[in-house]
Amino acid sequence: MTAIYGLYATPDGAQKAFDRLRAAGISENEITVMSSEPLEEYQFGSRDRQTVMPWLAILGAATGLTAAYFLTSLTQKAWAINTGGMPIVSNWTNMIVMFELTMLGAVFATVLTLMKTARLPGRLPKFYDPEISNGKILVGVAAPNARDADIVEGALRSARPEIIKSV
Amino acid sequence: MNLETDNRLTEDLLRPVLHTTRRFYVAVAVFSSIVLCGIATWGYQIYNGMGVTGDNWPVFWGFHETNFVFWIGISHAGTLISAILRIVNATWRRPVTRCAEVITAFALMIGALFPLVHLGRPWLAWWLIPYPSERGIWPNYRSPLVWDFFAINTYLLSSLLFLILPALPDFALIRDRTTGWRNRVYGFLSLGWHGTPKQWHRLESAMHIMALAIIPIAISVHTIVSFDFSMAVVPMWHSTIFGPYFVAGAIFSGIAALIIVMALLRKLLHLEAYLLPLHFQNLGKLMLTMSLLWGYFVFNERLTTWYGNSPHEMNVFWSTQNGKYAPLFWTMVICNFVIPFPLLTIKRLRSITATVIASCGVVVGMWLERFLIIVPSLSRKATSYSWGAYTPQWPEIVILCSSFAAMALLYLLFSKFIPIISIWELKVGQHPQMKAAAEVQDAEAAGELI
Amino acid sequence: MQNTDKQGQQGTPHRWGMSVDLDRCTGCEACVVACHAENNIPIVGPEEAARGRAMHWIRVERYWEGEFPDVALKFRPVLCQQCDEAPCEPVCPTYASSHTSEGLNAQIYNRCIGTRYCANACSYNVRFFNFFSPVWDKPLHLQLNPDVSVREQGVMEKCTFCIQRINTGKTAANAAGAPLKDGDIKPACVQSCTANALVFGDLNDPESQVSRLSHSPRGTRLLEELGTKPKVTYLQRESWNESGNR
């Protein structure tokens, strides 16, 4: 058996199921929740909020800044061409290129962090149910062992799901 | 969260994606043919030389550069709506964000083509890319055109990501509700999105960071485009006001474009329940603010020029006030200020139709403004023997029209394959807390005098 | 081979400049024709010239002053000023417009992608663009100068102070083992000026004619207030009253 899950019509129902599962001794890590919209007002939907993304964005920005600094100044020094009497390494104008690559670095770092931490692109979990896109919220446990399977099913049922499935 | 309203919402917003009318095919055919005419004309121009345009000595820049600045300006719509309203938590933005971001992405793509169109040797445009070449030479980072390369590419990449990432949950939605080729294609596009709280949090963090990043990028882009002019010591170009002036003008024209697009979507895709008069009211108020800001900048620029009375600048000044370009100048003032001001100020007049009329005027007026910045100054430079004139030729006019057709075509195709209103974001707006917050904001808005 | 191309001081680099005596210029435009011939400048034809596409690297500007019968006609030959702080140089994205060590503003055709920004930035309007591919109707093609390239459509061009003649002169001086003398190198316009109004030489040689003229009390520079530091000195006309006295 891969998983047991219930599909709930309301977030309250999903929250109840979540609470019953926790009460039955299933740890948070083992409970999977999937929904077609973010439900941060509910406790089940506010997990995994902590992220290092802003720091990585700053790191990406710093990388972009450094790359741009070296790109502009090193190439200007490599073949020094006089244009209009401006300095060979002209910092004021290089700053513009540095700004753009800084911002690009921040954006790329953010997107790459998103892809990595959200596991995109990735495979759908085996017990993903298209009913989620009809507004239902899926609460389930993946790969419960034989002893826990009944406990899980009981907890899920007690919150009155629309559908309950084992796959 | 009411399952019934949510499902009705999903049905309404997916309908344009899942059902295609005959009108759609006709529109695509019409716009595609105009775009093909434009591409063919560009080919004709490349083959025969820039001489087929109206460019000459000393007016070396004309319609193509006007279009460049104009389209990059239009692209500022998405940034204002999506990013700024997202950061200040304006709830009314939800149905509007994706419409706006799509304008940004496509206007940028079209705008970024024009530097290629205006080149004498466009087949060498890749020399602007910084790469270690066999000739040992790199781009000149002191040139505003190289700054353009970096700025526009940064903005384009960021905007595309800003558009596509929040579309992932909607792709997942379509994947789950369809079968056959749609299921496979959207399955691929959704990258395996399955809506765990972790994924939602990461997506929202990413959107928040990108919104914060994209605002300075957008401001820098149009400032850098303005540097194409202000860095040259040409009368009435070499002005410190150009940076903020162009950014304000860009946001102004972007909002106008957004209003027109939203009105068309509302009508053609039957989105009356989602794109409400409230949205047009709010955008209309924003456009009024930008119109006043634009007028303020124009007044600043004109007064300092006239008061300073520098001979070279006054030649250009008078050619726009009562000389050759005066008809265009005063048309611009009427379109950008005189028409929008009453339509958008007087609450009774501020209907959807009125905001669309004002917006059409603004789009025309802002195109004229770009033209009037470029051509009069070049036609009246320092030494009077070398004064000249500019008359557009048919290739420039065809390419201008086909840029609008390209925008329409790209937009049509986008709305066919991706829901034009972000479904999950709209659903979030229906949450009780969000709804309560929205109601408070609407009440405050309704209580205003204007 | 030892480089004997030094003038006066040991190994001082050249700094090419010109002076234009507006008092001597008769407006005959021999310089314009000579420049066209020397530098393979295309003739655009009357229709294109009427549309503002004529390419005269040196042009004679004509200004009328006053009302009849007190009309005065002034000629001013205008060519690339080879500015030391040229506004056309920083704006070129591909370094096609850059400054040489001998003070010339080089236009490197091979790097030009035709953005035309340099032409807009030039306050003297001395830069020209190949709007079409140049064509020389037979037998004019026989007259093309093999020392100068032919530019293709989409490329900017302008006066180079006849750099091909400068290079030939320097090479000849090296080969002969003798230093370059003032007047050895003459651009086509200088060579063909019937009134000797145009003088070309090395501004770093204090003995050269152009150096002395650049310090003349009659000397002015075009649009000097813009700070471009042009290297062409215009010697103003003296004015005479009716009885022939200054």
Image: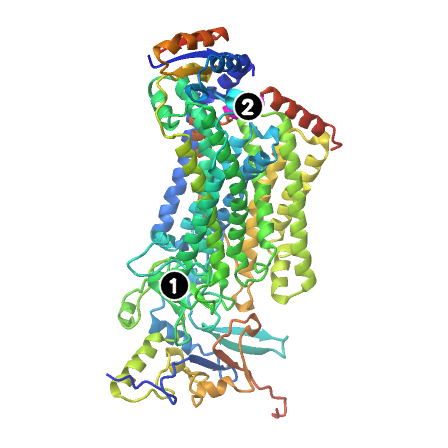
Query: Can residue B381 be seen in this snapshot?
Result: yes
Where residue B37 sits in the image (x, y, percent)?
40, 40
Residue positioned 65% across, 43% down in the render = B291
> Which chain is disc 2 placed on?
B
Q: Are marks 1 and 2 on the same chain?
A: no
Q: Secondary structure at mark 1?
A: loop
Of residues B370 and B287, the one nearer the viewer is: B287
How packed is label 2: few (under 14 Cα within 10 Å), some, or many (20 or more)? many
The picture quadrant where one finds residue B338 is top right
Residue that mark 1 sits on: C96
Q: Secondary structure at mark 2?
A: helix
Where residue B215 sits in the image (x, y, percent)?
54, 43
From the image, which quarter does the N terminus of chain B lie in? top right
Residue that mark 2 sits on: B428
The picture quadrant where one finds residue B92 is top right
Main SS of the magenta segment?
helix
In the rendered structure, which segment of residues is drawn in magenta? B424-430
Query: Can residue B20 be seen in this snapshot?
Result: no
From the image, which quarter does the C terminus of chain B lie in? top right
**CA distance for labels 1 and 2:** 55 Å
Amino acid type indicated by mark 1 = Ala
Q: Residue furthest right?
A: B449
Q: Is residue C230 left or right of residue C36?
A: right
Where residue A42 sits in the image (x, y, percent)?
55, 20
Of residues C214 and B175, the one nearer the viewer is: B175
Looking at the image, what colour scheme do you see?
rainbow
> Which chain is disc 1 placed on?
C
Where residue C195 sits in the image (x, y, percent)?
45, 85
Q: Is residue C224 left or right of residue C206?
A: right
Q: Which mark is residue C243?
A: none
